[in-house]
Amino acid sequence: MDLRPPSYPRHHRSPEVSRAQLAVPFALIALVTTIDVLAPPDVHLGPFLVAAPAVTASFAGPWMTGFVGLVAVLAQVVVAAARTSLTDLNHTFQIIALVMISVFVTFFAHLREVHEKELTQLRSVAETAQEVVLRPLPDRIGPLGVASVYLAAAAEAQIGGDLYAAARTATGTRLIIGDVRGKGLEAVGDAALVLGAFRASAHQVAGLPGLVDYLEAAVSADLDGAGDEGESFVTAAVLEIPDAEPVLHLVSCGHPPPLLVLREGGAEQLEADRPAPPLGLAGLVASAVTAQTFAFAEGDVLLLYTDGVLEARDRAGGFYPLARRVSAWSGLPPHALLDRLCQDLLAHAAGNTLDDDAAMVAIERLAAP
């Protein structure tokens, strides 16, 4: 089950909020005009009318800003006619200044609206690219129940390189979760490279070490061509879950260890004794790739995640205590576990954005048919 929510709520103004906002400049115009007409001759409040179009430009478009500016100018004309005359030098200069300021703020409202449209278009392209790279995982893969979620760190066009995928083989299921160093479209391109290599080889390459070597060769070849060896890399956890055995095989390439949420309660970190270097760095670090085997019994839930989950901070700067929180949620199916985890993670980071993108995949070994 893919639980991918929008990164963060988009700020669309509801009709109720817009009416409340628009009431402010018009109320200001009415208040200033009334007081200015009734004030003593030596008191002039007309300059305060410039606040009306200026306030409107902060939330409305150029047409509404220009309209409010026009109403403010007409109000100043009414004040001039009521107090002295339209040819009075003081009121004439106030009207001219109000017209100029209204024109300026209307132009700035136009620039802000254009910028917001560009951001919306760029965000739409980014989200589409992310969805193409990260195909939704099915609810069921062989004897496994699966759920996945992706939380982006920013509401604008920045998108990251977190990745996950699954592939069926003749004897089981292979999965990968990873995190590309960096952000933006370049990171998404690197994530697409890793996912493409995984999907192409997961059905063919025998053994997890061979699969990781294949992924390393694909990433290294791309980085060598780009000339940034050692600067870009991908942390990843590559797993194989056999259908016929209650175990899982893991190769960790510098990635945070998976959490095994036990059916009887509690959670265990699956720490690899001999982790491999991140993909793209094997040429710099001599290390043989070995797979490690862990128990994965019926009813247990395996949680894969990227470091964006661990790096989420609260207002006091404390990191998210993932293992402690998850250990209290034993017995939840994958989709319920991720739903609870996302709510708790965002509540932990209340008032802050996530420091990094966060991807999570939960896998439960179901009862044999």
Image (cartoon, rainbow, N blue to C red):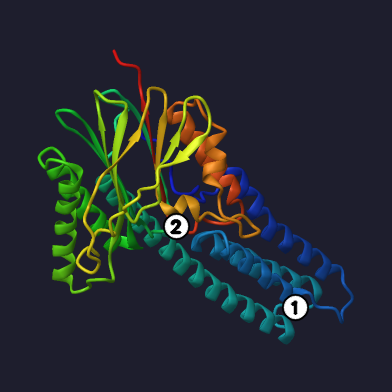
Mark 2, Cα crowd under 10 Å, few <14 / some 14-19 / many 20+, is many
**Tag 2, which secondary structure?**
loop
Residue 231 higher or lower than 332, as above or below: below
* Horizontal and vertical percent position of residue 83: 81, 74
Judged from this view, the residue extending furthest toward the left is: 204
On residue 356, the disc is 2
Query: Is 108 above or below relative to 9?
Result: below
The local crowd at label 1, few if under 14, some if 14 to 19, many if 20 or more residues have their Cα within 10 Å, is some
Q: Is residue 363 left or right of residue 342?
A: left
Looking at marks 2 and 1 on the same chain, the residue that comes earlier in the sequence is marked by 1
Residue 80 in view in this figure: no
Residue type, label 1: Ser
Q: Which mark is residue 85?
A: 1
Looking at the picture, which amino acid does disc 2 mark? Asp
- State the quadrant of the N terminus: top left
In this rendering, the label closer to the viewer, 2 or 1: 2
- The answer to whether residue 97 is above or below residue 142 is below
Tell me which residue sits at (78%, 62%) in the image: 31
Viewer-proximal residue among 310 and 46: 310
Query: Residue 100: where, in percent of width, then height?
Result: 57, 79
Residue 95, how many percent across, how many down? 65, 78
What residue lies at 63% left-to-right and 54% top-to-bottom? 22
Q: Nearer the viewer, residue 294 or 164?
A: 294
Q: Is residue 150 visible?
A: yes
- Indicate whether 73 appears above or below 146: below
**Front residue of 138 and 117:** 138
Return the residue found at the far top.
Answer: 369
